[in-house]
Structures are given as structure tokens and as C-alpha cells.
Amino acid sequence: MKRILSLLAFSVLSITTYAQDTLRLKFQNNEHLTKEQVFLGKDIFDNTYVKEGDIFKKNTKYSGVQYRSKELDSLTSIDITNPLELMLFYKEKKALVIVNKELAERSVVQLGVKFPSMDISYAYGSTKRNYWLVNERNKSVNLYNSVTYELYRTFSIPEGAKVKQYVALPNLFFWIDTDNVIHGHNLAGSKVLTYKLESGYDLIQILDQDKLLYTNKNVLYFVDLKANKTSVIDAKEKSISGFFYSNQKLSIFDGQKLNNYFIKLP
């Protein structure tokens, strides 16, 4: 009788474990990075971007270039969405730096001078020369136009909400609360998404308002929000310190090597 119960328990566990679809990867090649580097992503030209301390690096197939500000330190984040115009955010210095594809400095926006009353905790590129700016002082999410110098509040995060992370795309803004609920808004500030992840997460990449990837305990998942379906990605890496997906290409950084794969997402 005990053996029968054990077999039944194993069967139920197996069904639970394998209920999720598994997405297969096709290995393409790998690149050597160091554990001191933070993998940021790749662009449509297959260039690789990393952050190493206050240094921003771009590795091409045959060479590499890098940028380090002479006046600013404590580099917080980098937006690589547009490979021709990349944005670096220095939270402590309240500044944005725009560099071109060669990582040559084009302009510096002193946010602390333009908006002395704001406590800007997050910045990311939007559309039409706009930038997403989050003001922690009043929990407002704003669009700043670098041509007209106008600042427009799109929406405010509810009072008392506990924010875990901000994630932006050019035309969408997401904030994730400590209960792992993703809240999405469009350029007009209208709410377009509320979705609770099945578990906690370590790293996340939101592809659009319908699809995202995230890791939890070194397991990589793909979520189809519209279908409310989660799939496991069959990654062989025992440790995942970074990943990036674009155009059916998935790169996974294990702390030493950047492994590049082909994957077809549903």
C-alpha cells in the first residue's frame, strides 16, 4: 500500500513539474566576458554592451570602444534601445549623457539644474526625443522632451505602493510592486496591464505588454501574458547573471561566457 501511495505521489509531482511547456534553444556561439562586467544586451547589429563600474563598453565583432565620463561617476543605468543614440543615467549626479554609436559624447542633460525640486530615481528613453523620468518625491512618472524642454506628468504611482523595480520601453512604462505584480501604462498614462507573476524573480526583461522573460533561482521563464501561460526555457547554464532577448536571439551570461542562442518564442 505504501509503495502504491509513493508511486501516486511521484506521478502527481511529475505532472506538476512537467505541466509547463519547455522551449528549446539552438546554440550559435559564445563570447568571453568577465565576472566584473554587467551584461546589458545586444543590438540589431549583434554588438554586445556591458557595464564595468563607471565604464560603458561596446564590443563589436572585430573591435571595441568604451566611454567613461570625465566629470560624472556612479553610473546607474544605460539605455541601449537605440544603437545610434545611447543614454547613460547618473542618479547621484542627477544627469543624463547621450553618446553616439562610437560612444562619443554628444550631450549632457543636467537634470538637477533643470528640475532642482525633483528626486529623479529612474530615467529611460521614450519616443520623439522624450525621456521617461520618475520623481521619487511625489511618485510621479513624467515625460521630458529634450527639444522643447517641457515636462509632462503621465501618471502617478498610488500612495503607499511599494515599488520593487521600474522597467520602461519607448512607448510603455512598467512598475513592479513587492508582491511581484506588474503594472503597465502607455504614453498617455492609461493603465494597459496588471499581471501577477507566478513566483518571485531575480532578473526580468519585458518585451511588450503581452510578453516577458524572467529568471527565478537560475531558471529562465517565458510568459505569454495574453494567453496567461508560462513556459520554461531549456537553458543549460547553472548560473544566470544576465540575459537579453531580441529578434529570435537569446543571449545568456553565466558569469564567464556569454552564450548566444536562437529561439522561437510562441
Image (cartoon, rainbow, N blue to C red):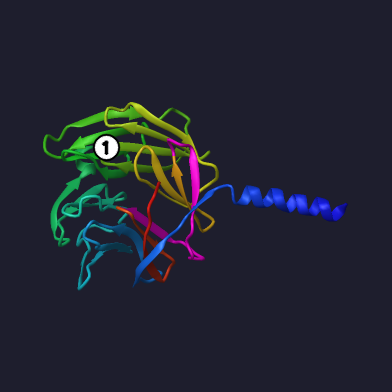
Task: Describe residue 43's horizontal placement relative to residue 16 as left or right.
Answer: left
Task: Name the spot of residue 56 as percent of width and height, x first.
Answer: 26, 62
* 73 is higher (above) or lower (below) than 94: below
Q: Residue furthest right?
A: 1
Task: Name the spot of residue 187 as percent of width and height, x first.
Answer: 27, 31
Task: Name the spot of residue 168 as percent of width and height, x first.
Answer: 32, 42
Residue type indicated by callout 1? Asn
Measuring 29% from the left and 44% from the top, which residue is drawn there? 123
Residue receiving disc 1: 171
Measuring 33% from the left and 28% from the top, which residue is drawn there? 155
* 118 is higher (above) or lower (below) than 65: above
Range covered by the magenta-colored residues: 225-246
* Residue 175 is at least partly visible in this image: yes
Task: Describe residue 194's horizontal placement relative to residue 39 as left or right.
Answer: right
Task: Name the spot of residue 266 as percent of width and height, x first.
Answer: 40, 46
In what element is the residue under mark 1? loop
Residue 182 quadrant: top left
